[in-house]
Image (tube, coloured by chain):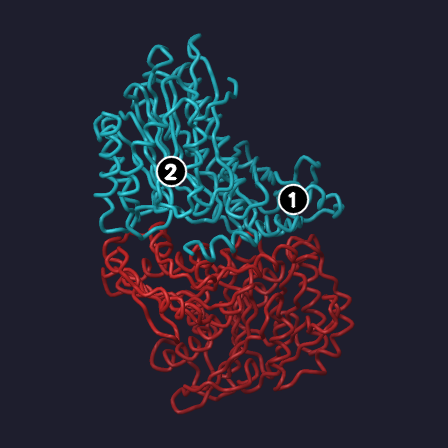
Chain colours: A cyan, B red
Amino acid sequence: MNFVSGGVCAAKGFKAAGVHCGIRKNKTKKDLALIVSEKKAAAACVYTRNLVKGAPIAVTKAHVADGTAQAMICNSGIANTCASDGIETANGMCQLAAKALNIPAEDIVVASTGVIGPSLPLEPIESHMGELVANLSAEGSGDAATAIMTTDTVKKEVAVSFEINGVECKIGGIAKGSGMIHPNMATMLVFVTTDCNIAPETLQKALSADVVDSFNMISVDGDTSTNDMVTVLANGMAGNTQITEEGPAFTAFCEALAAVTRTLCRMLAADGEGATKLLDCTVSGASDVATAKTAAKSVICSSLVKTAMFGADANWGRVLCALGYAGVDLDVEKINVSFKSAAGEIPVCRNGAGIPFDEDTAKKILLENDIQILIDLQSGDASAQAWGCDLTYDYVKINGDYRT
Amino acid sequence: MNFVSGGVCAAKGFKAAGVHCGIRKNKTKKDLALIVSEKKAAAACVYTRNLVKGAPIAVTKAHVADGTAQAMICNSGIANTCASDGIETANGMCQLAAKALNIPAEDIVVASTGVIGPSLPLEPIESHMGELVANLSAEGSGDAATAIMTTDTVKKEVAVSFEINGVECKIGGIAKGSGMIHPNMATMLVFVTTDCNIAPETLQKALSADVVDSFNMISVDGDTSTNDMVTVLANGMAGNTQITEEGPAFTAFCEALAAVTRTLCRMLAADGEGATKLLDCTVSGASDVATAKTAAKSVICSSLVKTAMFGADANWGRVLCALGYAGVDLDVEKINVSFKSAAGEIPVCRNGAGIPFDEDTAKKILLENDIQILIDLQSGDASAQAWGCDLTYDYVKINGDYRT
């Protein structure tokens, strides 16, 4: 497996585009993205578990109920959530794209991200649909990745090539998400494309299994969004024998999918609203995976751990505290903690109690921007990894006046 | 029932003191508090549910196992948690106080608050015990309330007088807590004293019932502390017939206790680390109390709601979002939301969808420092109230370099 360029257009038969249509006032910010497969593709989705759901979620669910889709359209600026005309608008977006692409509206995945509440106007989308379709290209992944950004500071795209029985396949994705990130069985907006030939139900199985260890293990601020969605389109154009069941080919596909989703996870957490650091917490030595996952997430969600990391303060007591209230059964007197980064590793807690350490060395390690918090529960063989970010002045700034 | 002065010394037979002993480097900050009853008192406690517990918790549990105590000692600066000599130190604090007061060490409630990890030195406590005891007075509540503060910006004390069968009783309390506040069945440090005559098990029943609706409904930052504890001493010196069972006298006592604890709750939330506003969320129209409680807590815990309130931004979509991921069953299309303060009330969401409102009026309401978020689920008769605060630059500042 190799990382390759091209993002969501790396796989054969996919084109993408992103334009500014005017939903956002800032004319330099693209706000409408389109990703299209040359052929109808197997489609799999996972969705937010927030009871308040964006209208596009309902429309997309209906459209991929048959396990297929051919295009994905997404706007940023307004989430099309809690607006009385939401369903109508989400359907309208699909119809406009369908007409321009000459495919059925039922083959379109629709998504929106932005402010909850206001109605999403269709007019800017309608008036720019021609430009959007005209811009579709195999080099369009970056534009699409840019158009779906809200408070994100960098676009997020990745792709890998891999082999299925000697046939080269590619899989790539783009993602957006910076705040309101605390996925629960589905997450922010992630669009993945592959030319691998895989049956819809097998694709769904792969995706549903993947998000449990990838997007569901990120948190920026503990807020689960109303519009989270991960979609994969697989158009089969790589030409491999269709994957229809578990086995070596399915495993190879899942590994490639995981490489894409893990990379996007790290990108999402590192670009958390206001973040200056990626926090990567690994809990090992747990009695079971559920314990390890819950413990790791509790640590990366703690406001006190997050602010300590912002301050490059090796305040390991807050890590212990977050483990203690995680709601899992653990033996406090067996917990080991160390901090690690490119600048080195420093153990700070052994068997639940502090150990002497050099504060200057700890500070140097924590001043890096990619911090690992390593926790060993010394109680078993299970482990889990979770990703988060520090809590900074800029998080408050960004969210104190998001609508203005 | 009337609010009275005197705090933890309002009730007959209680004296208190607070001094600087040197656990904290800042010589102007008191760091050691003592509260003593003239007579041995009925004692009730509730404790943090964090699995990582401060050593004082274990020692206090043992000392109040017989339902009685006579004094409470508490230091700030170091939490005496996760230190290898913790139990020894907590016992040492009790022995020093016991010797100076000439009472058994087993009649002393001990508590500590501050940084987790370092050993708490006994020497400063030993060398200042004489001064502490010499300062005990019926006017000492304020000094004790000051000595238990950590990042708190104001001392917190309250007292009320009430009648039991024509006998005047008093109950008062002091509290500390500003960050790491997200109680779970017990909370920060709260010391309550009363001269009401009430049996230990009846007192415990009253306290355990009270915290469910008081301290367990506050959150500052979602972090449940390792040292949280609420203690009540009831010395019976008011002279009422002992309360030993439910009935009018028990109800009167519970109402007085609630007046004290609710007031302390509002004080604690309003003084949340970095907070500029108290958030008071009431969820009504719920199908049951558990739903109302969970929903109210989800709203006041949301980082996005908290930052919006800091920015005086009527971003009600974030309130809906927080309700949606609260994990309770609710009908989104029935949710009404309005914001209220001394400047007025403004409905912003009706039946799950936005309604037109004047942004200037909303801004004026949200610029106040005591904000009510009123939510009607229109699905039943149950309601609940939760208290929190906004999330500000200063929260990040305070916690980015707490140890330095």
Work out whether A74 lies above or below A276: above
**Residue named by callout 1:** A351
Q: Earlier in the sequence, mark 1 or mark 2?
A: 2
Q: How many marks?
A: 2
Question: Where does residue A365 sit, x and y in percent of width and height?
Answer: 69, 41
Q: Chain of mark 1?
A: A
**Type of the residue with mark 2:** Ala
Give the number of the disc on residue A186. 2
Work out whether B233 lies above or below A218: below
Q: Are marks 1 and 2 on the same chain?
A: yes
Mark 1: which secondary structure? loop
- Measure how far apart labels 1 and 2 are at the Cα level: 35 Å
Question: Where does residue A333 sit, x and y in percent of width and height?
Answer: 62, 46
Going 41% across and 42% down the picture, which residue do you hit?
Answer: A183
Question: Where does residue A6 sit, x and y in percent of width and height?
Answer: 46, 23
Q: Give the mark toward the camera: 1 or 2.
A: 2
**Type of the residue with mark 1:** Asn
Q: Quadrant of the C terminus of chain B?
A: bottom right
| A65, B350: nearer the viewer | B350
Badge 2: residue crowd in 10 Å (few <14, some 14–19, many ≥20): many
Mark 2: which secondary structure? loop
| A379, A115: nearer the viewer | A115
